[in-house]
Amino acid sequence: MMFRFNPRYFLLTLLLLGVEIFIGACMHDAVIRPYGGDVLVVILIYCFIRSFWRLRVLPLALGVLIFSYLEETGQYFHLADRLGFSRPGLMRTVIGWYFTWADMLCYTLGIGAVLAVEGLVRRRRAGAEARETQAGKEARETRAGWRRSGKEAREIGAGNEARQTGDAGVNVEQV
């Protein structure tokens, strides 16, 4: 685990946090608030961690998923009530108070989305690096070709000069 600030992940974290706050404050429907927020929260946690630590994608994604499952399991056992957060408030909202299997599915879908996007980004970077490597190889070959052709041109020029000069060293064309 290596500390390294990543501004892209940090901006994604802030964006997702804003969306989560908007969903919690303004959405009162039967789909986005209960399910969309759960899908996004695992992505938010993943992006937050990637903002500050350079970790491999799969172990981090699985760690976030396990953390989310444990948090949901805590809801099954009424952890918020046991910790004394029986009245509505921030901690009760963060810990949660109602277990559902649908939340587990949403967490899984969210991490699936993380893995899919990270896989696409990785393939895109690998393709760009391969194209860059190929372009660099072609540039080196072109420069080597120029050096060869320059050397060949000098050799050809020297050969032409020898043919144009007679045995006495006098230029035939000048006579």
Image (tube, rainbow, N blue to C red):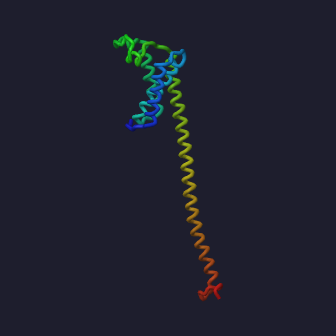
| Residue 128 locus on image (x, y percent) | 55, 44
Please, is residue 111 above or below residue 149 in the view? above
Up-down relation of residue 98 to residue 17 (above or below):
above
Q: What x and y, as percent, mark residue 67? A: 43, 23
Q: Residue at x 38, y 18 (%)?
A: 90
Q: Residue furthest left?
A: 84
Q: Is residue 95 left or right of residue 171?
A: left
Residue 17 or residue 125, whichever sits in front: 17
In-image side of 36 versus 85 (left or right):
right
Residue 61: x percent and y percent?
47, 29
Q: Residue at x 62, y 84 (%)?
A: 165
Residue 59 seen in this snapshot: no
Quadrant where the N terminus sits is top left
Residue 14 visible in image: yes
Residue 21 falls left or right of residue 163: left
Quadrant containing the C terminus in the rendered view? bottom right
Residue 154: x %, y % from top left = 58, 72
Number of callouts: 0
Quarter assignment of residue 70: top left
From what the image shows, is residue 156 above or below residue 144?
below
Q: Residue furthest front?
A: 26
Residue positioned 54% across, 57% down in the render: 140
Residue drawn where x is 43% and y is 33% of the image: 10
